[in-house]
Amino acid sequence: MIDSRDVVEDVDLLVVGGGKAGKTLAMDLARAGRRVVMVERGMIGGTCVNVACIPTKSLVTSSRLARRAAAAQSLGLSIGKLEVDVRMLRSHKDGVVADMVALNHHQFLDSGMDFVLGTARFVAERTVGIDLNDGGRRVVRGADVVINTGTVPHLPSVPGLAGAAPLNSETIMDLERIPERLVVIGGGYVGLEFAHMFAAFGSEVTVLDRGPRLLPREDADISGVLTECLREDGVEVLTGVTVKDVAREDAVRLTLEDGRTLVADDVLAATGRDPVTRDLGLDAAGVRTDERGFVRVDDTLATDAPHTWAVGDVAGSPQFTHVSLDDYRVVKAGITGGTRTTAGRLVPWNLFTDPELARVGLTEEQARATGRDVRVARLPVKAIPRARTMRETRGLWKAVVDRNTEEILGVALLGPDSSEVLTVVQTAMWAGLPFTRLRDGIIAHPTMAEGLNALFTSWVD
């Protein structure tokens, strides 16, 4: 409730949380002359900039270079013994983050928004009380309100795990040493990126996953090739296993349900993320959540409360910054009288292992489940000339096409620079082009994208 002593400030837009969607909307409308307040607890620029995409991909760059250096002789170079300096790694990562935080802060102030560092809690519909980080309190009411509070790493309820000082996707990037032995619980995107990264830095890495194979949303052939690449690079992959309990003495001891025991210096829990909604006072705002705590929204990202939206991870959107940016477009349309929705979005996925996996559209299994008559193409990456010049020939490209319409239904590209090539296919899918346009188009040689000519002639079904 609003305290009788509170002075309520009225603004056009109130944004709670400064993630990609919220900060972009706040800056956009502030530059258009709207009165905007954006409240952020402390991560200037949001999760992506501070503890997710940007720092992790900075370290991915280092791990890839380490792997290239180890194979330098195959490229005719002798560069001596590779040494990984954890302090230099952190300096590299922290430097990239600091530059982007400073850039974001400058953009916030330059836009004309009122950027507030503090903790917000709803006290009424469209109204928050803000405990300011530097002391004091403000109460702000927005004509329109956007909730963009994001998510935090989930800690699974494994007996003993919480007391074993487990790492998560954020704390692992602040290590003071490279662990000799690292166990990763969870074989999803986050777990696999860190597993491959730390293997390149010299750790003995074991990945544990409850499912029968890694990445169950991918087709088995793509998942299988990626698993083999991980194993070739020294990552032990154990699937179909469950952790029974964990204990830490001098080291971490993990007991599996099948009786096996693993010993490690550190354990990384990479088992998803939880929404930041528990202490937001959403009941006072008239905003409802689902059973997992994510804010309930419709396909315009509107909540159950009037003139109140939720965007990004906290709204249950796919947990990618590029999706959050599209959430901004959807909500801006809702506020300014447009009609954009989240229905039918063509969302790309990128896994930055080495080689990397890029995916958009339907898998083969999903396409067949629609009842369509489909064609499937597969191309080993070693068939692409550019891959041979780089001596990076591991991987598999796969495409699924409607046999009758020649429409591209989806691709999975496992290989070097796949995330860059993916946009070519995604653009063709947006345009509704038949696969023949990529099969027969003149694509520069030698590039990885040139492999699309060959992929769409490599039919296996």
Image (cartoon, rainbow, N blue to C red):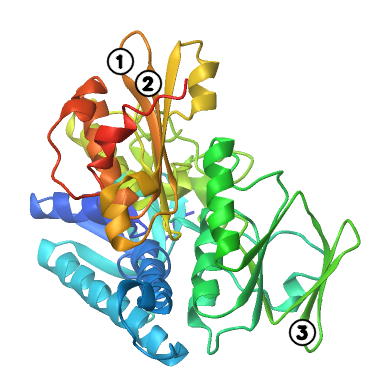
Dot 3 falls on a residue whose secondary structure is loop
Tell me which numbered mark, 3 or 1, is placed earlier along the sequence.
3
- The answer to whether the residues at label 1 and label 2 have Cβ atoms under 8 Å apart is yes
Q: Earlier in the sequence, mark 3 or mark 2?
A: 3
Rendered image quadrant of residue 64: bottom left
Element at label 1: loop
Q: Residues within 10 Å of mark 3 (few under 14, many from 20)?
A: some
| Amino acid type at image mark 3 | Ala
Question: Which residue is label 3 attached to?
Answer: 251
Q: CA distance from mark 3 to mark 2?
A: 51 Å
Distance (Cα) linking label 1 and label 2:
6 Å
Q: Is residue 383 left or right of residue 282?
A: left
| Kind of residue at disc 2 | Val
* Residue drawn at 31 percent across, 28 percent down: 456
Image vertical order of residue 370 relative to residue 327, above or below: above
Q: Earlier in the sequence, mark 1 or mark 2?
A: 2
Q: Who is closer to the viewer here, 417 or 26?
A: 417
Residue at 48% over, 40% down: 286
